[in-house]
C-alpha cells in the first residue's frame, strides 16, 4: 500500500476503470482528474492540460 500523496489523471482514451485499482493500492489520493480528451501519451497530445493538472496537484500539497 502506497501512503504517499498521490494524484491520478484519467484521460478519455485511456483505461477508464482505474479508480478501483488506484484506491486499492494508494491510501492517500489527494487529487483526481478526469479529462475528455487525451490518452496514454497525454504529454504529447495535450501538454497544456497535463501541466496545469500537475501544477494543481502540487499546489494542493502545500
Image: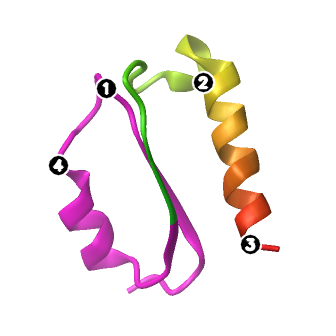
Q: Which numbered marker is on residue 12?
A: 1
Distance between the Cα atoms at labels 2 and 3? 22 Å
For marks 1 and 3 on the same chain, the one whose residue lies earlier in the sequence: 1
In this view, the mark in front (2 or 3): 3
Question: Dot 4: what SS?
Answer: loop
For marks 2 and 1 on the same chain, the one whose residue lies earlier in the sequence: 1
Circle 4 is placed at which residue position? 17
Q: Nearer the viewer, residue 32 or 20?
A: 32
For marks 2 and 3 on the same chain, the one whose residue lies earlier in the sequence: 2
**Residue farthest top in this picture:** 45
Distance between the Cα atoms at labels 4 and 1? 11 Å
For marks 4 and 2 on the same chain, the one whose residue lies earlier in the sequence: 4
Task: Specify whether residue 27 is painted magenta.
Answer: yes
Residue 46 relative to residue 16: left or right? right
In this view, the mark in front (3 or 4): 3
Circle 2 is placed at which residue position? 43
Q: Residue at x 78, y 60 (%)?
A: 59
Mark 4 surroundings: few (<14), some (14-19) or many (≥20) residues within 10 A: few
Amino acid at each position: 500500500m502506497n501512503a504517499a500523496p498521490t494524484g491520478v489523471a484519467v484521460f478519455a482514451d485511456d483505461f477508464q476503470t482505474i479508480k478501483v485499482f488506484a484506491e486499492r493500492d494508494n491510501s492517500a489520493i489527494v487529487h483526481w482528474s478526469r479529462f475528455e480528451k487525451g490518452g496514454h501519451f497525454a504529454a504529447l497530445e495535450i501538454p497544456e492540460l497535463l501541466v496545469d493538472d500537475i501544477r494543481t496537484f502540487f499546489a494542493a500539497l502545500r
